[in-house]
Image: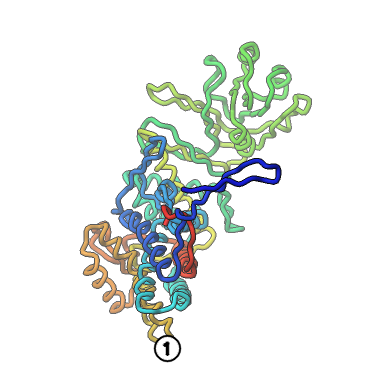
Amino acid sequence: MSGSLAFDEYGRPFIIIRDQERKSRLTGIEAHKSHIMAAKSVAGVLRTSLGPKGLDKLLVSPDGDITVTNDGATILKQMDVQHQIAKLMVQLSQSQDDEIGDGTTGVVVLAGALLEQAEKLLDRGVHPIRVADGYEMAAKVACEHLEKVSEEFTVSPKDKEDLVRLAMTTLGSKIVNRCHRQMAEIAVDAIMSVADFERKDVDFELIKVEGKVGGKMEDTMLIKGVIVDKDMSHPQMPKVSGYSSNCIVYEISSMVQQVKDTGANLVICQWGFDDEANHLLLQKSLPAVRWVGGPEIELIAIATGGRIVPRFEELTKEKLGKAGTVRELSFGTTKDRMLVIEDCNNSRAVTIFIRGGNKMIIEEGKRSIHDALCVIRNLVKDNRIVYGGGAPEISCSVAVAEAAKKISTLEQYAMKSFAEALESIPLALAENSGFAPIHTLAEIKSRQVKENNPRLGIDCLNKGTNDMKSQSVIETLSSKRAQILLAVQLTKMILKIDDVRGSADQM
C-alpha cells in the first residue's frame, strides 16, 4: 500500500493512502458468474440439511460457543460470509424466517438452483433481463397452480389432531424429533390459547419461550401462565400461594403493612429490598419475589390483570392482579427453583418451558418450537395447505413446463429452466434420504402425470407410500408460495447486477 504526504490549509501534514491496487472490479458476464458461484456455494451448504433425514451443521463462534442445528436461517446467520451475494442469500433466509418462520432452508436451495439454471442460459447467450422476465412468468404460473392444488384445512381448538400432524411435519427434520409429537402438541396448545379466530390473528407477544439446562427434553411443558426464573425472597416463605391469589407488582420496598391491607398475598418487586424488609414481609406472612426483570414484570401484569404500581400512594385493591396458583418449581439435585404463576385472570398469556441436557439442546429446542408456532400461526391466518415431501414442487414443475410450451418468445427457455430448478427440492430430499435421486424423481414425476395426483412426493421416512396425504406430511400454502416468490425476487436482483466494485479479497 503506497501513500503520499499532503498539507491542509493550516500547514498540517496528512498522508493520503492509495489502496486502489487492492480494489477489484467485475463487469458483465464475469460479474454474473461470480455472483452465481457464491450463491451456489451457500445453497450447497444448506442442501444437505433439507428434509427429515437432513444433516445437522456444527457451527463454532469466534468465542468458541458451539451451535448444532439444521435450521437454515440459524446456519446462515452464524456463518462468516464475506461475499456480497452470499450476504444477500443470508438475508433471503432471514426474510423467509421473518415472514413465514419456516422453509428457511428450502428457499435458499431453490434460489441456488434458479441461479445455477440461469448460468446455463447466460452461457447460451440469453440476456439476464430475459431470464429474469421468464422466471417471473414461471413464478406466477407456479403460484396459481399451488392455489389450484391446495386444500382447505379446518382450524379449530376443538379438533387439534390435524394441527398436531402439521406441526409434526415441521418438527420432523429438527433435533427434537425424538419427542416431536409432544412438542407439536405443546405448540398447538400454545397457539390455540392465544389465537384470535375472529380477526384471524395470533399475538406472539403472549407466548414466551423459556429454557433451563437440566432434565430431559420430555420434561418440556406448557404453562398456562408465566414462569419467572426467581424464587421466594426468604426460604421460609410458603412455596405455594392458595387459589384466588392477589398479586401486587411494585418497584420500591416499604410500607409492608399498606400492601397487606390491600388484601395482596404475594408481592413481586422489580428491584431488591433489604433483609429488614424481607423479615417484615415474612412476619406479615406476605410471600415476596425480588429482582424480577422489567419484561417479566410486564408479562406478569398482563397475565394477572394487575397494574404495575410505582408509588405506594397509588396502591389500591382494584390494582391487584389475580392468579389461580403461584408455586415454585424445583429441579432435582440442582436445587434450582423457578416461580410459576398459573390460571391467571388473563389466561391467554402462556409460557413454553423447554428442558434439555445442555445449552445447545435448549437453544435448538427453542428454534424448533418457534418454527412450529409460526406454521400453526400461518394456518390461523390462511387455512390453505399443500402436501410436502417435494410433491408441490414436482407438480408445479410439470405445470410450468406445460405453460412454457405455449410461450413463443425467448422467455420459454427461462420457464423451462425454472421448472428444472423446482426439481432441486425433491432431488435433495431423495439424496438426503439415501435414495437414487434422479431415478426416484423420474418415477414420482411420471406417476404424478399418469395418476393426476399432485400429492405424490418423496417417501423420506420409508413408510411404504408416496402419497403425502396418507403420510400426513402437510405444509402451509403461504410457506410454499413465499419460498417461490422470495427466491425469484432475489434471483432477479442478482441477475440485474453486472458491475461490482470492492476489495479484491471479497470477490
Asked which secondary structure carries label 1, the reply is loop
Above or below: residue 475 compared with residue 206: below
**Along the viewing direction, whichever of 138 and 161 lies nearer the viewer:** 138
Is residue 423 visible from the viewing direction of this image? yes
- Residue 265 location (% of width, % of height): 63, 23
184 or 429, nearer to the observer: 429
- Color theme of the render: rainbow
Q: Position of residue 387 (x, y in %)?
A: 38, 65
Give the residue type at disc 1: Ser
Q: Is residue 438 above or below residue 49?
A: below
Q: Which residue is outermost to the right?
A: 313
- Taking 93 as reference, is 348 left or right? right
Q: Position of residue 140 (x, y in %)?
A: 48, 75
Label 1: how many residues lie within 10 Å, few (<14), some (14-19) or many (20+)?
few
In the rendered image, residue 26, in percent from the top left (x then y), is placed at 44, 64
Q: Residue at x 70, y 46 (%)?
A: 9
**Residue at 27% across / 76% down in the picture?**
446
Residue ID at (69%, 31%): 320
For disc 1, the marked residue is 408
Q: Who's the residue at 37% across and 55% down the image?
A: 169
- Rendered-image quadrant of the C terminus: bottom left
Q: Nearer the viewer, residue 95 or 283?
A: 95
How many tags in the picture?
Answer: 1
Left or right? Give the position of 88 relative to 289: left
Q: Is 309 on the left or on the right of 387, as rendered?
A: right
